[in-house]
Image (cartoon, rainbow, N blue to C red):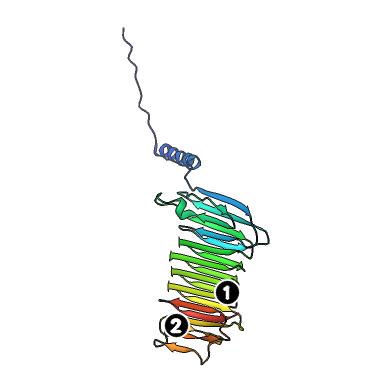
Amino acid sequence: MSIRLLSTPLRFSGAHIFSALVVCAVLYSFGSPTANAQNRVSKRFPVGKNVRVELKNISGTITVESWNRDEIKITASLETPNANVYPKLMGECVSIDVMGDNRGRGDVGDVNFKIQVPQDSSVDIETRRGDITVSNIRGGLVRAHISTEGDIKLLDISATQVLAQNTIGDIHFDGGFSRGGTYQFQSTKGNISVRIPSDSAFRLVAAAPTKKIALGEFWHNGFKTLGDGRKFVGDVGDGRSSVMVTTFQGSITFIRR
């Protein structure tokens, strides 16, 4: 005697299939460690007042601002694929080298930094892509360098040496020039604006496309105009600091604070 099992094929409606897909999608979004992932790194270092901060990023926004504490706080938001971020304290220098720590890894996501430092710190920032904002710094150096695209804003700066350079993007400086200080602003394709007190004294070399240099209240007849108006050279006041401003495709504007 033999027994034969009869099977009835299962039937799924379109609504059943859609519901199952929705459930799978929800479960995946909660279970996958990479879905909408964004990690954060936070680090604090107790330091003296004249510390130096060095950051080499790959891409992402960078904000540096001062606060009334003898420590540096670094907060980094990492977008996937997550980069390695290892801040280090070496003597009187806090170093973050995202480029070096991720060499050979291929593509990594943006790393967006917020760094809080003592007011008298020196700041040396560079990245391949992304905006840089540095505010309220009184140290010896403020350097901001973007090798490809991004805007640079230097706000309420009184450092004795300021260097700002990018390829594509605007540069805005708002601060003061110190006696004997050096200030260089250069963009390949971007507008440069400099906002300084009316009693500022400096020797200026400014170069831009024809008729795109506006010195405003700082202009006087002692300036030499070279290259059909593409370059201005001259002293404002006693010329006690050195200022060089260059853009190849953009404008230069000086504004009185």
Asked if 227 appears above or below 16 in the picture, the reply is below
Residues 17 and 115: in front is 115
Residue 189 visible (yes or no): no
Q: Residues within 10 Å of mark 1 (few under 14, many from 20)?
A: many
Between the C-alphas of marks 1 and 2, the distance is 20 Å
Q: Residue 17's image quarter? A: top left
Residue 160, position as x, y percentages in the image? 58, 72
- Label 1 SS: strand
Name the residue carrying label 1. 174
Q: Residue at x 41, y 81 (%)?
A: 209
Q: Farthest left residue?
A: 1
Q: Residue furthest top?
A: 1
Instruction: Report whether residue 194 is seen.
Output: yes
Q: Quadrant of residue 115?
A: bottom right
Q: Position of residue 163 (x, y in %)?
A: 51, 70
Q: Name the amino acid, label 2.
A: Lys
Residue at 54% x, 73% y: name it. Answer: 173
- The mark that comes first in sequence, 1 or 2, is 1
Q: Quadrant of the C terminus?
A: bottom right
The residue located at (47%, 69%) in the rendering is 165
Label drawn at residue 150: none
Are the residues at dot 1 and dot 2 in contact (C-beta closer than 8 Å)?
no
Q: Quadrant of the N terminus?
A: top left
Picture residue at 56% right of the left edge, 64% below the top: 123
Residue under pointer 2: 212
Q: Residues within 10 Å of mark 2 (few under 14, many from 20)?
A: some
